Amino acid sequence: MPFDCQWLVFTVLGKMFYRKDSVDYQFINMKSDPDETMIFRKIYPEVTAGYHTNKRNWNSVNVLGLLSEDLLQEWIIHSYELVVGKLPKKVHKELSEQV
């Protein structure tokens, strides 16, 4: 919880890919491909610009809306993969060997 006691932060080797509001459980933030962030915001009313994050790369999602659990899980995995994909190749290889 590097920011405050409200946000649970999930990282890969210190790089944040997901955070969840631990007070009201309504919102999550996740990294997104910059080309997809705006598309998701236009298609899904539950998706807005990332709260206290880079609006180009992050979305906030209201999980109490109509989005399916499968779609949310897909987005979280994609967020993880975006962060892992930016890691140095050596670290990326070591990480994939641990899984």
Image (cartoon, rainbow, N blue to C red):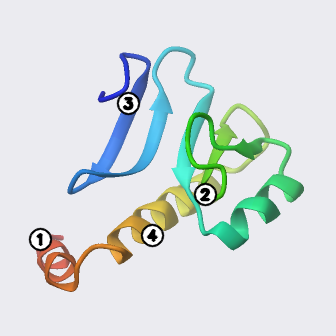
Q: Residue 61, how many percent across, how many down?
A: 67, 41
Taking 17 as reference, is 41 left or right?
right
- Viewer-proximal residue among 2 and 10: 2
Taking 60 as reference, is 6 left or right?
left
Q: Residue at x 45, y 21 (%)?
A: 22
Q: Which residue is mark 2?
A: 70
Identify the amino acid type marked 4.
Leu
Give the crowd class for mark 3: few <14, some 14-19, many >=20 residues within 10 Å. Answer: some
Question: What kind of element bears circle 1?
Answer: helix
Question: What kind of element bears circle 3?
Answer: strand
Of labels 4 and 2, earlier in sequence is 2
Q: Which mark is residue 81?
A: none
Q: Which mark is residue 98?
A: 1
| Image quadrant where one finds the C terminus | bottom left
Picture layout, residue 62 above or below residue 40? above
Distance of label 4 from label 1 (alpha carbons): 18 Å
Distance of label 3 from label 4 (alpha carbons): 19 Å
Q: Are marks 3 and 2 in contact (CB under 8 Å)?
A: no
Q: Which residue is mark 3?
A: 8
Q: Mark 4, mark 2: which one is toward the viewer?
A: 4
Q: Residue at x 48, y 33 (%)?
A: 20
Q: Are marks 3 and 4 in contact (CB under 8 Å)?
A: no
Q: Which residue is mark 4?
A: 82
Taking 81 as reference, is 36 left or right?
right
Q: Mark 2, mark 1: which one is toward the viewer?
A: 1
Identify the amino acid type marked 1.
Gln
